[in-house]
Image (cartoon, helix red, strand yellow):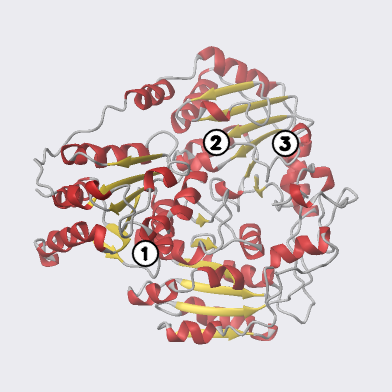
Amino acid sequence: MSGAETVVQILADEGVDTIFGYSGGAILPIFDAVFRYNDERPADDGNSGLNLVVPANEQGAGFMAAGYARASGDVGVVMVTSGPGATNTVTPVRDSMADSIPLVVICGQVPTAAIGTDAFQEAPVAAIMGAVAKHVFLVTDAEALEDTVRSAFELARTGRPGPVVVDIPKDIQNAEVDFKGTGSLPLHGYRRRLAKVEENFLSDEACERFFTMLSESDRPLIYAGGGVISANATKAMRRLANEYGIPVTTTLMALGASDTTHPLALHMLGMHGVASANYAVEDCDFLIAVGARFDDRVAGNPGLFAARAKNIAHFDVDFAEIGKVKRVNWHHVGMLERDLTDMLAYGRRIGFAKQFETWHEEIANLKKDFALNYDRESDLIQPYAVIEEINHHSKGEAIISTGVGQHQMWAAQYFDFRGPRLWLTSGSMGTMGFGLPAAIGAQFACPDRVVIDIDGDGSMRMNIGELETATTYNTPIKVIVLNNFGDGMVRQWQKLYFGGRMSGSDKSLHSKDFVKAAEADGFKFARRLEHKDDLSAVIQEFMDFEGPAFLEVVIDRDAGVYPMVGPGLSYDNMITGEWIKSREKPAHDELDPSEMF
C-alpha cells in the first residue's frame, strides 16, 4: 500500500466512521485515499465507508472531533494540511488536552527533504504541538508509519485520555510500504506507567480505612469530576452513592455523572455552582473526590475548601493529581470503574451499614432554601427562563453544547442531565466558539439524539462559518443565541471589579444580523425572539422543527450569573445576587485584576 492508503486502512481498523478535516496540498494523498476507499466500498454493499466532514475552518474541524469524542467516548479524528491547516488546530488540541478528550490529529507536512527550509506552508508542528498535546509524532520513516498511527490511537484513548498529533510528510504518504495489519511502537515507559495504574488494585486494608472514615462521618459528600465520565465510571459511582445514601455534587465537566433530578444530587459546585452544593461542601465532614482535580474554579482558596471535613478521600487515574492542590487523608490511583466497584463489593462483604437521614434532610432543606431563582416578573426575557423552557422539552435527555461565557453557566445551572456525555463544554480552556462545531460533531456521533447548542452572541461570532456546515450535512442541530449585545461574563466582572468600565466588551453598536446570517447559510427555521409573551410558543416551534433550526433570543442585558464566588475566595464569600437566598453576608472586595480569569 501507499502510506496514504495505510493511514486510511488503519482508521477503518480502529473503527473510525467519521473524519473531520480540511484539504490542502500536503494532505491530498490521504484525502484521495479516503475517496478511493469509499469508492471501492459502495453503500449498497452494507459498508458505509468513512464519512468525511469538511468544516469552514480547521479549528471547526478540531472542535467537531472533540464534540464527537465527548458525546461518544470514542476517539475523534481530525485531518488537516500542513502550515496554517495544522496551526489552526492548536486551540482545539490544547482544549482537548486540558479536558482529557481523546483525539488523533493527522497533519500533512512538506516532504522530508524540505523540512527546515521554510518551504511553502511549512510549520514546525512537533515544536508547536509538543507543548499542548499528549504526544506528537513526526514520521520520517515510511516503514514506521503503520506502527506510529496505531500507537497514536492507543495513546489517545488509554490512561488519562488526550489528543495525539501525527505529522506526516507528503513523501511518506506517497511511499510504498508493506501493510502488516498490526503492530505498535515500543512505548515501554508509557506502558509501564499505565500498567502501574492498571495493576494497582484496592487492598482490603485501603478499603477498611475508607469505610472507617465513612463510619465516623455524619455528612459524607461525593465530589465528582470529569474523570468519572472519561473513565466511564458513572454507573459504578452512582451505585456506591446510592448504596450508602451519599449525596453527590459535580464539577462543570462532570454534569450528568449524577442524575441531576435525583433527590441526593446537588448539581454543580464551584465559582458559579448552585448555592446548595457549595453550602453542602462547607458542611460536609467527609469529602470523597472522584476523578476531580480541585481546580481553581472549584477550590479557589484550597485551604478553606471543605474546611469542616475531618477526612478527604481521593480516587483518581493520575498520580500527579494526588496532593497537587489539596492534601488528602486517603487516596487511591487506579482504574476508577473497577475501583469503585471493588469498594462497593468490600462494603457489602463486611455488611457496612450506616444511616444518614439527618444529613439527607439537611440536603433537602439546602436545595429548597437556596434554590436557583431570578426576576420572574421582569418584562424583559430572562435567559434562565429560556433554559427552563427548553429543559421542559428536552427533559434532561438532550445533548447540550455551549460556547463560553454567561450562557455557558446558565445552561450548566438550569438544565437537567439524566446521564453522562450529554454536556459538552470547554471547561479548563474556556474557549469561545466551541459550542457550534462541537454540537455538529456530537450530532454525527449520536444521530438519534436531540443536540442543542446554547451560545452567546460573542461566542457565535467566533465560529459562525460552521452554520453552513450544519446545513450542508443536514445535521438537525438546534442553535440558540442568547444575545445580550456584548461579552456578558466580561461585563459582569467589569461591573463587580472594574468600576463598571466596559472596556472592549460592549457590542451594542455592532450590526450583525444573526437571523439573516443563518438564513444565508441555509437554515429554513431562523427566528428572532424579542417578546417575553412569545417565549413558550416560539420555543415549542423551535424544538418541534425537523432539521437545522436557529433561534436568536434578545435577553435582558443586565442578567447576571449567580451564585458567584470571586477568584481566590472561599464559599463563605459567595455572592448569591438579588433573587437567590444567602445564609452568609456576601463579600466582594476589590480584587487584583491579575488574579482574575
Residue 192: quarter of image: top left
CA distance separating discs 3 and 1: 40 Å
Q: Is residue 361 visible?
A: no
| Residue hosting label 1 | 448
Q: Residue at x 55, y 33 (%)?
A: 240
CA distance separating discs 1 and 2: 29 Å
Percent across and percent down for residue 66 are 42, 54
Comparing 322 with 450, the one in front is: 322
Is residue 5 placed above or below 194 in the rendered structure?
below
Percent across and percent down for residue 313 are 63, 26
Badge 2 crowding class, 10 Å Cα cut-off, few under 14, some 14 to 19, many 20 or more, is many
| Residue hosting label 3 | 357
Residue 577: quarter of image: bottom right
Left or right relative to 398: residue 522: left
Badge 1 crowding class, 10 Å Cα cut-off, few under 14, some 14 to 19, many 20 or more, is few
Q: Residue at x 51, y 61 (%)?
A: 434
Of the residues under marks 1 and 2, which one precedes in the sequence? Answer: 2
Left or right relative to 477: residue 279: right
CA distance separating discs 2 and 3: 27 Å
| Residue hosting label 2 | 291
Please tell me whether mark 1 or mark 2 is closer to you in this view.
2
Secondary structure type for disc 2: loop
Left or right relative to 270: residue 14: left
Q: Disc 1 marks which amino acid?
A: Asp
